[in-house]
Amino acid sequence: MERIPATGGTPTALTLGPGVRNASSAIFLPDGRHFTFLDQRDVGSSEGTLKIAALDAAAVKTIGPANSAAFLENGHLLYLRGSTLIAQRFDEKRLEASPETTPLVTDVAEFTVARDGTLFYKPGGASIQQLTWFDRTGTATGTLGDPGNFFMIELSPDRKKLAVSLDADIWIQDLARGLRSRFTFTPGIDTNPVWSPDGRTIAFASDRSGRYGIYRKSADLSGTEETLYLDNIPTLTDGWSPDGNSLMVHRRDPVDQEDLAFLQGSKLVPFQKTPLRELHGRFSPDGRWVAYLVNESSRDEIFLAPFPGPGPKEQVSTAGGQQPRWRADGKELFFVAANGMLMAADVTRKGDAITVGAAHSLGIRVVNERGWMYDVSADGQRFLVAVRPDRSNLPFTLISNWQLLLKN
């Protein structure tokens, strides 16, 4: 984030402290010195934490989970949490927010508010997707289950079940019967479910302790839940090695952005740890390579690196890349380009060498601001995608005296 004088000049960087990862969407408070901003969970994501900073100070104050920066009007912060417009009482002198929040309007995509009490918003903000099957021509061939607010989808190794991160919990969907049953039940956010290679257990990330740690439980809910790893740095699951001995994770280190590591038992081993942002590592089916994203340039790109290393990494994508996945035989690598299109690239192995061909689009658009929002059949011929409906033509809504909504 940068600042520039109102009269023009050269932009200068703002120092917002080590706890800020991806600052965006600044809105000034009436004093012209403090501003609210969204600290994004991931680059390009609309999900994050609402924070307040000052132009002349590095200290940052955290308000709470949000999906936008906030306006301060009539003694209240107004911001989005999910697709709900929230009002939260705020003391501007003390920079303190009341713990209570009031929902004003639901299904909001974007909004603005004027000093005279006028609220102007566009509906269509509900992050609802429909799980949809596509073939390799990009043609939709059917849907699966009810729509939902998905953050990640993950087919089981036998492709008979689906683990989904839905709202703040994880659910298991039976593909044949279409039944969806809840898998996690504790307070907090449970996300990033990944199946063990034998399909018997699921590892996932949860912030139930106040920070993300790694947990595991049986896919059939038998036995007791196990804590695999928990320390002071938020750690999230990415994927198992094919032998089940290593679990790739990424760590949201406030100093080094995000780094890749892998768990072997309770031991955490660094894999890619640089000043760059590295995450979402996926093992190749033979376990010898990891596809992951890194912001080495001005955007995220997909790279390959040998496992467990060391060795040189190889760039795969050239127009942005996220959400890497392998075909079950390792002969194809899929990822989502910066424009949201699902890409495929042929992979050739010869001895210890690996070659990735030019990527081509499959004509399937994937949500590109969350975790893995698609998965692929074992033969690479069918794709299950969380599809967001087109609601771009919905009309804008104007509300006079939005303060009256506080009394409803």
Image (tube, helix red, strand yellow):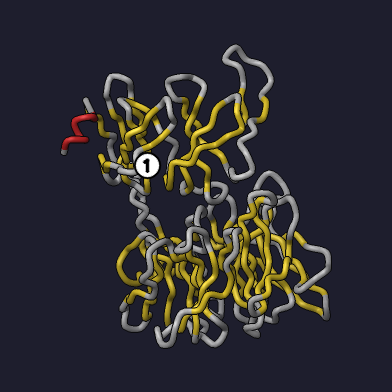
> Could you tell whether 269 is left or right of 5 in the image?
right
Residue reaching furthest top?
7
- Residue 212 position within the rendered picture, expressed as x and y whole percent measured from the top left: 52, 62
Q: Quadrant of residue 307?
A: bottom right
> In the image shown, does 231 or 136 lie closer to the viewer?
231
Residue reaching furthest front?
94
Q: Quadrant of residue 95?
A: top left
Rendered position, 325 above or below 301: below
Rendered position, 223 above or below 164: below
- Residue 102 position within the rendered picture, expressed as x and y whole percent measured from the top left: 27, 41
Rendered position, 289 above or below 45: below
Which quadrant would the N terminus be assigned to in this image?
Answer: top right
The residue shown at (40%, 85%) is: 220
- Residue 266 position within the rendered picture, expressed as x and y whole percent measured from the top left: 64, 76
- Residue 399 position within the rendered picture, expressed as x and y whole percent measured from the top left: 23, 30
Residue reaching furthest left?
408
> In the image shown, does 293 or 137 lie closer to the viewer?
293
Local secondary structure at mark 1: strand
Rendered position, 201 above or below 369: below
Which quadrant would the C terminus be assigned to in this image?
Answer: top left
Residue type marked 1: Leu
The residue shown at (70%, 79%) is: 287
Mark 1, other Cα within 10 Å: few <14 / some 14–19 / many ≥20: many
The residue shown at (36%, 42%) is: 109
Count of numbered marks = 1
The residue shown at (17%, 35%) is: 407
> In the image shown, does 72 or 316 lie closer to the viewer?
72
- The residue pinned by badge 1 equals 80
| Residue 342 shows up from this direction | yes
